[in-house]
Amino acid sequence: MTLDLIIIGLAITLEPFPVMGFILLLSSDKGVRKGLAFIAGWLACLVLVIGCVLLFTGGSPPKPHTAPSTGSLAVKLAIGLGLIAYGVHRQRKAGHPREDPAWLGKLRHVSPWSAAGMAVLLQPWGLVAAGATTVMNANLSHALTWLTLVLYCLLATATLLAMELYATFRPARAGARLQTMLTWITSHEDQAVVLLSLALGFWLVGRSIYELA
């Protein structure tokens, strides 16, 4: 479980679209405050999903080869196949002219409350769902499990936290650096999405098939 959650957490934090939206928030008036609201909403989603899964399992993993265990692996397999299909789709569309959603540019003008709500919309829910299926194997009687869940949430938020801290303590430098970063991410978004989708997709499929067998 630990390795799976680390890989999924890294994939979430490297997902380019939320990072692009967060940079736009930070570049706005009172951007640091809006960034904090965004991070709060982002973490709240992760914690809520984990809490719901643990409430369902009672903090104990389902026994192998039972209906709940097989069902969670089947869902993880389906998510992995979906990520592979999406990665292939984005690879075929790479290089074609594509405009970002109009509302993305409006992030500079939202309130802190709206910024928290945008965190819910920009959450990569496919990856979060993959994390949820993995959390079903969590055993809360072990201290390592709690540490793993905390590490997962921190990893999934690491990029946002790093940019928030940079904008807070180095505001003069952060503006130009983050805009440069936004330009780079925008020009490499397709490649990043394809790589993340295929890598995580094949990992989930391989793990699911192995555990089902």
Image (cartoon, helix red, strand yellow):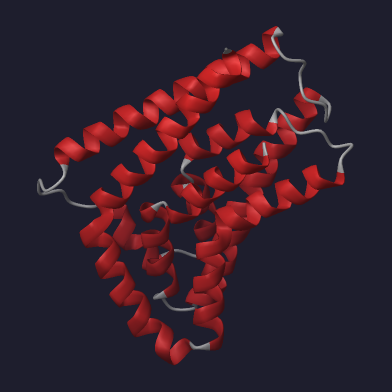
State whether residue 106 is above or below residue 60.
below
Most extreme residue toward the right is: 141
Q: Is residue 76 left or right of residue 27?
A: right
State whether residue 28 is above or below residue 157.
below
State whether residue 67 is above or below residue 170.
above
Q: How many marks?
A: 0
User: What residue lies at 34% left-to-right and 30% top-to-bottom?
Assistant: 84
User: What residue lies at 56% left-to-right and 67% top-to-bottom?
Assistant: 161
State whether residue 210 is above or below residue 197.
above
Most extreme residue toward the left is: 96
Most extreme residue toward the bottom is: 172
Q: Is residue 12 left or right of residue 154?
A: left
Residue 158 in the image, given as x and y percentages of width and height: 56, 62
Quadrant in which residue 82 is drawn: top left
Residue 107 in the image, given as x and y percentages of width and height: 38, 62
- Image quadrant where one finds the C terminus: top right
Q: Is residue 71 left or right of residue 20?
A: right
Residue 207 in the image, given as x and y percentages of width and height: 53, 27
User: What residue lies at 84% left-to-right and 37% top-to-bottom?
Assistant: 140
- Image quadrant where one finds the N terminus: top right
Q: Nearer the viewer, residue 89 or 46?
A: 89
Q: Nearer the viewer, residue 206 or 162?
A: 206
Quadrant in which residue 63 is drawn: top right
Q: Is residue 101 visible?
A: no
Quadrant in which residue 179 is drawn: bottom left
User: What residue lies at 39% left-to-right and 24% top-to-bottom?
Assistant: 81
Q: Is residue 184 visible?
A: yes
Q: Nearer the viewer, residue 48 or 130?
A: 130
